[in-house]
Amino acid sequence: MEFKDIKSIVDLMKKNSLSEFEMEKEGFKIKLRRAASEGKPEEVQVQHYLPPVTGAAPAPAAAEVPAAAPAPEKPTDPEIKSPMIGTFYRKPSPESESYVEIGDRVTADTVVCIVEAMKVMNEIKAEMSGVITEILTEDSRPVEFGQPLFRVRPA
């Protein structure tokens, strides 16, 4: 697989809001994972695997694919994750205020957002007490099951 092929896959991932891509073909495996958050540049991690050489023929050079930057340190604050696939909304209607902002205190019963799935608006509760430290998803964007939506510093 050439660099231009990988770039095409990354472009498709961006266009379709995919966060992960994995492909295996003829003894070659590639896994791409996107990480993006508000205010920070998008990062694409590339992992590729080649089977061990068992004959006299040399393996293709792995240096053809640029190495991914080292992963940044992960914040230790717990995350509120999406319980379903759907569309993320920070407010109940376009004219309304957002449910929560960075710095807001939440309790286990505080509604932090809505995830729309199949035309049903599902209110998502914090399910923990603390202070919102980070909003990890943009308003009106698709989200996946288990995708982090907010970070909360426990209080």
Image (cartoon, rainbow, N blue to C red):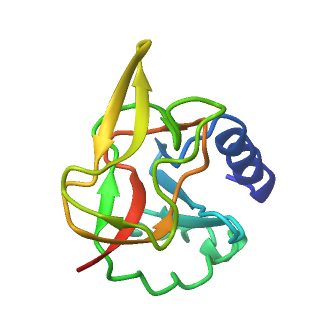
- Left or right: 117 as drawn, with respect to 48: left
Pick out the residue farthest to the right.
Answer: 4
Pick out the residue farthest to the top.
Answer: 119
- Left or right: 4 as drawn, with respect to 134: right
Q: Is residue 54 visible?
A: no
In the rendered image, residue 33, in percent from the top left (x then y), is placed at: 52, 57
- Left or right: 26 as drawn, with respect to 124: right
Q: Is residue 48 above or below residue 117?
A: below
* Total marks placed: 0
Q: Quadrant of residue 9?
A: top right
Q: Is residue 11 above or below residue 67?
A: above
User: Residue at 44% of width from left, 25% of height from top?
Assistant: 116
Q: Is residue 105 visible?
A: yes
Viewer-nearest residue: 113 or 116: 113
In the rendered image, residue 27, in percent from the top left (x then y), is placed at: 45, 50
Q: Could you tell me which quadrant the C terminus lies in?
A: bottom left
In the rendered image, residue 64, in percent from the top left (x then y), is placed at: 71, 70
Viewer-nearest residue: 125 or 69: 125
User: Residue at 70% of width from left, 38% of height from top?
Assistant: 12
User: Residue at 54% of width from left, 68% of height from top?
Assistant: 59
User: Residue at 43% of width from left, 68% of height from top?
Assistant: 104
Viewer-nearest residue: 103 or 114: 103
Viewer-nearest residue: 94 or 57: 94
